[in-house]
Amino acid sequence: MEIYLPIAQVTQDVFVLLGIGLVMGFLSGMFGVGGGFLLTPLLIFIGIPEPVAVASSANQLVGASLSGVITHWRRGNVDFKMGIVLVTGGIVGSLVGVQLFSLLRRLGQIDLVISLSYVILLSTLGTMMMIESVGALVRANQPDAPLRRLHQHGWFHRLPLKMRFRRSKLYISALLPLSLGFGIGILSAILGIGGGFLVVPAMIYILGMPPSVVPGTSLFQTIFITASATILQAVTNQTVDLLLALVILVGGVVGVQYGARFGARMRGEYLRVMLAAIILAVGAKLLFDLTVPPGNVYSVLPRLE
Amino acid sequence: MTRTRSLVLAAFGLILLTSPACAQQLVADLTDHLVAITTGFHGTAVTLFGAIEGGGDVVVVVRGPERETVVRRKSRNAGIWLNTRSVSFANAPGFYQVFATHPIEQVVPASLRQLNEIGVETLKLTPVGRFSHEEVPAFHAALIDSLQAEGLYGQGTGRVEMLGEKLFRATLAFPPNVPIGTYTVQIFLLRKGDMVAAQTTPLIISQTGLEADLNSFATDQAVLYGVVAVLAAVLAGWGATLLFRNV
């Protein structure tokens, strides 16, 4: 069954979109990340124009992450104070990001920046996760190996504006989560991601939050950052395809339930190795597409206002 | 400039039709002046039909809405293909197709083809902004090639069928990716290399139903649309949690 997407102005098979949502939801439930970093490239692969893919992914993530937060909140695993500080930085970041997005689009370089940023982000993150999780697997087989410290105290722990985060059992400078949120806000606007896959490691390794509150808090800030990115994209670039977002969301919310249950039965290290492999594969595909000589060196598009 | 040109043409057509000497040499109309793009739109066809008096060849030019179009060229930099050069054309029609009873080269003299922009190679595209003159022809050709590949510009001449001496008919096909907007359908009657009658009729292609509402909502009330998009996602996410609460 085909469906005409009004903003993307393309016709797509509704089952392909539902399937993508289902797979995304499954991965998101299994690994506890929003999945925006995989959704946008997937939408681009099936022929949704890059700017629409980015903006609609952000829209879709609002619903997906809300669904996740409710589940975590029931278990008391959300640090709302930390979340609000992250969100404050994030909203400023997405304001900057959307302007940057518009500028790049006018210059005709937005497609390149989206693809290239993904290649860099995915390959770096995928490699780091692969090394970390394979290392963890090896250590798990050698029980006498020394344990690593959760996080080191660095220069950033001496910054001013200290704040107490009771739920995370932390007393750190508010500038840290603020700037983290700012960076994620920019990326959210340009790449259509919620930033979970970046926030989660940053929360653990830089902020030093206890792992139990990390997914819930990360998803909490994702709701607001993607919501603000959605509205800003709608206003500045008019690229939010609500129909596209909702169809994927329907697939996603079903997938996430099964993914969560499947993930609960697997060992964390194996999950991280798998996630790292998927991330690396998507990154490699995007890089390959950038380096292959295009079939036609010319591209023709109506000028956007 | 192009609007005036089509107005002049329309006026020209009107004069021809109303002047007694040429009365009713050419009459034509479309089966439908409004094409609606709805869910599951797969492209469509509109039939043009009409009658001529005194013989001759019928040539039909269908032009889509004009818009500024950017042609970009990729080149390889540090192993990566990226857009490096670009030329904008102010007035490229979003759709262009010619139909005729015989190939236009045989029935329309070159000067008339140039004057009336009959045939894709005669389209006068005006480069705007910053560009270098040597580059324009290559970008112009790329624009035509690309739109031909997308099925938006015709390759060669479509068929106008004569049904007997007087009646003619043509099927104007539009692909699924057809741009929305106001189209003009120009019908010319040629006799021995002279243009003896002309007529212009409009055709509107627009989205209707949910898609159209969403699209105009997104452009006319962008802030509200953004808020509604977020709320819709929130409701869907919340609803899903309730739905799966006890599963």
Image (spheres, coloured by chain):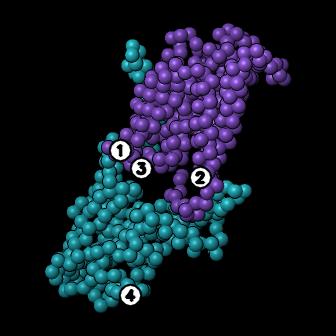
Chain colours: A purple, B cyan
Q: Which mark is residue A289?
A: 2
> Dot 1 falls on which chain?
A
SS for tag 3?
A: strand
Q: Which mark is residue A50?
A: none
Asked if marks 3 and 4 fall on the same chain, the answer is no
Residue for badge 1: A3
- Label 2 – label 4 distance at C-alpha: 47 Å
Location of residue A233 with respect to B32 vertically, above or below: above
Asked if marks 1 and 3 fall on the same chain, the answer is yes
Nearer mark to the viewer, of 2 and 1: 2
- Label 3 – label 4 distance at C-alpha: 39 Å
Q: Quick check: marks 2 and 4 in contact, CB under 8 Å? A: no
Mark 1 is on which residue type? Answer: Ile
Nearer mark to the viewer, of 2 and 4: 2
SS for tag 1?
A: strand
Residue for badge 4: B109
* Crowding near the residue tagged with mark 1, few <14, some 14–19, many ≥20 C-alpha atoms within 10 Å: many
Q: Quick check: marks 3 and 2 in contact, CB under 8 Å? A: no
Asked if marks 2 and 1 fall on the same chain, the answer is yes
- Label 2 – label 1 distance at C-alpha: 27 Å
- Label 3 – label 2 distance at C-alpha: 22 Å
Nearer mark to the viewer, of 4 and 1: 1
> Dot 3 falls on which chain?
A
Give whichever of discs 3 and 2 has the lower sequence position: 3
* Horizontal arrangement in the rendering, residue A260 relative to residue A119 (left or right): left
Location of residue A170 with respect to B127 vertically, above or below: above
Q: Which mark is residue A10?
A: 3
* Horizontal arrangement in the rendering, residue A20 relative to residue A189 (left or right): left
Mark 4 is on which residue type? Answer: Pro
Location of residue A127 with respect to B114 vertically, above or below: above
Residue B45 in picture, x, y percent from top left: 28, 61
